[in-house]
Amino acid sequence: MRRMMICLMAMLGVLTLSAQSVYDFTVKDDVGKDVSLSTYKGKVLLIVNTATRCGFTPQYKELEALYEKYSSRGLEILDFPCNQFGAQAPGSIQEIHQYCTANFNIHFPQFDKIDVNGENAHPLYTWLKAQKGFGGFDVNDQRGKMMDEMLRKRDADFDKKNDIKWNFTKFLVSRDGKVLKRYEPTDKMSDVEADISRETNPALNVIMTRTSIRKYTSEPVSKADIEALLRAGMAAPTAVNKQPWHFVAVTDKAKLKELAGNRGGMLEQCALAIVVCGNLDKALPGKGQAYWVQDCSAATENILLAAHALGLGAVWTGVYPMDDRVAAVSKAVGLPETIVPLCVIVIGHPDESPMPKDKWKPENVSYNEYGK
């Protein structure tokens, strides 16, 4: 019997190590039926370990509010009651479900009780913890400081381990089954909602997950994708609808090498470069002449976002107003004097997967609110 248990645990360990996404796991629902998480392919998932007698139990109300707001946009909240933290999830899953329905009117699915830590931890949670480890409590927050002090008294090195620390730890999973973030129970639900809003809104998701790519495969960019990129650029806002832009799409390897000059190998490696230019003949006259820079910058951002949406990688390399670069790029692609290159967008199929940077800094924002 002991050998059988050891073999079973070894098999579960292999499953966890080989798992590529959340869809590789099977869990039991509230009536004991096996449910493959592949059922939720294409959904944004928030996976939570919960308890009904915890100080954080009122978060059920906030979770239900999130579910009501975002479920129509593709959010699923998967609730796994766990009795490992202060024995605060007593009773059967049926009793827990009845309590949550009566007190918080929840509608998201609840699954059978599980362990999330230790030798009996469910493989799903072993995998989740491996994907996103413990990032610490915010000790500037009163609840975060309380949790840090409480757990540190039990284990001075608790923060060096990736195990689940308490009830209502949450994992956000993308539509393709990859773990994006881990939230501790003291993290603000407003931060959780901001990330869910982004993940459930395709346009916001493209904006917030785009990142600069500087390494590319040798695969060419299709003509259909090139046209889609150019159409996206031309859909940008423009002062008085002057559309003072001109785009040069370069796929010729010799021209790409000439564009690269002495600035590195990205342009020699990529499959496509789009030179975004201002056509001064189309620009506003007089003092409005400089608006072409803003218009072409907006077009550049559209192209960068469209590239990401198409599964391509891209990076913006500046040209204007550096005279030497303007002259070199103009010569490489044969531009007349009235067409001025603003930048070169390097594009190709990505050969790297850098994580997007969180650039949100509240100190960079001020509000002028009505009546204040």
Image (cartoon, helix red, strand yellow):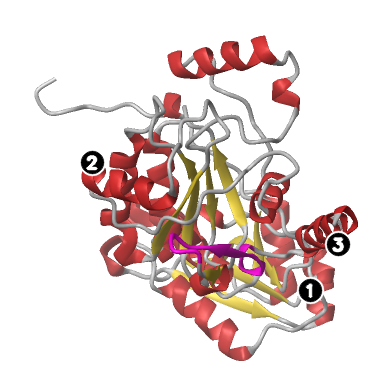
The three-letter code of the residue at mark 3 reads Gly
Q: Residue furthest left?
A: 371
Q: CA distance from mark 3 to mark 2?
A: 61 Å
Quadrant where the C terminus is found in the figure:
top left
Looking at marks 3 and 2 on the same chain, the residue that comes earlier in the sequence is marked by: 2
Q: Nearer the viewer, mark 2 or mark 1?
A: 2
Disc number at residue 256?
1
Looking at marks 2 and 1 on the same chain, the residue that comes earlier in the sequence is marked by: 2
Question: Which stretch appears magenta?
Answer: 22-32
Tell me which residue sits at (22%, 27%) in the image: 368
Choose between 319 and 290: the one closer to the eye.
319
Disc number at residue 265?
3
Q: Nearer the viewer, mark 3 or mark 2?
A: 2
Tell me which residue sits at (70%, 49%) in the image: 126
Q: CA distance from mark 2 to mark 1?
A: 64 Å
The three-letter code of the residue at mark 1 reads Leu
User: Is 57 left or right of 211, judged from the image as shown?
Assistant: left
Note whether residue 290 is visible: no
What is the number of callouts on the image? 3
Disc number at residue 103?
2
Note whether residue 25 is visible: yes
Quarter of the rendering containing residue 67: bottom left
Tell me which residue sits at (60%, 73%) in the image: 336
- Image spot of residue 307 (x, y percent): 58, 70
The three-letter code of the residue at mark 2 reads Asn
Quadrant where the N terminus is found in the figure:
bottom right
The reply to whether discs 2 and 1 touch (Cβ–Cβ < 8 Å) is no
Disc number at residue 334?
none
